[in-house]
Image (spheres, grey):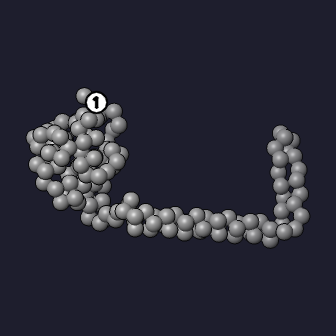
Amino acid sequence: MGTAILFMTPNGEEMVVVSRQDYDALLKQAELAEDLEDVLAVKEFERRLAAGEEELIPAEFIDRMIDGESPIRVWRDFRGLSGKDLAAAAGISATYLSEIETGKKEGSISAFKGIAKALRLDLDDLVWNRDETSVIDD
């Protein structure tokens, strides 16, 4: 790289002037660094996927959630569980689960925790499109 010229602006801000060639080289290095970060992120995801720590979700299920369908119902369908089976695994009644899925009841934090555990998810996966204040603890 060539010579950089350092100077101070009237308000005390330090500025540097570099040649166009050096500027272009710095941009290229920044792009390469971003590309490397992307490659490393993909490799980490692939490692986590192989270890069973991540999973691939078909677009049809994601689209259903984006369209506003209950994430609990979508995840339940994705996992192949009936409402009755999920409710039993979560320690709640099937009626209560149905009311949560249809929006008739907000659902308590403890109910959501049980559902998340039964579906092998983080709590955030069930409430990503909800107002955080709408889930009330028992």
Residue receiving disc 1 = 137
Question: Residue 62 lies in what quarter of the image?
Answer: bottom left
Query: Can you say whether 28 is above or below 76 in the image?
Result: below
Q: Amino acid at mark 1?
A: Asp
Could you tell me which secondary element the residue under label 1 belongs to? loop
Q: Residue at x 77, y 66 (%)?
A: 23
Q: Residue at x 55, y 66 (%)?
A: 40
- Number of numbered labels in the structure image: 1
Q: Residue furthest top?
A: 138
Circle 1 packing at 10 Å, graded few (<14), some (14-19), many (20+), is few
Residue 2 at x, y percent in the picture: 87, 68
Q: Residue at x 15, y 45 (%)?
A: 87
Residue 28 at x, y percent in the picture: 69, 70
Residue 59 at x, y percent in the picture: 30, 65
Q: Is residue 32 visible?
A: yes
Q: Is residue 27 left or right of residue 100?
A: right
Question: Residue 48 lies in what quarter of the image?
Answer: bottom left
Q: Residue at x 40, y 64 (%)?
A: 51
Q: Residue furthest front?
A: 51
Return the residue nearer the eye: 1 or 109.
109
Q: Quadrant of the C terminus?
A: top left
Residue 111 at x, y percent in the picture: 23, 38
Q: Is residue 128 visible?
A: no
Q: Quadrant of the N terminus?
A: bottom right
Q: Is residue 74 left or right of residue 55?
A: left
Q: Is residue 11 left or right of residue 84?
A: right
Query: Can you say whether 120 is above or below 21 in the image?
Result: above
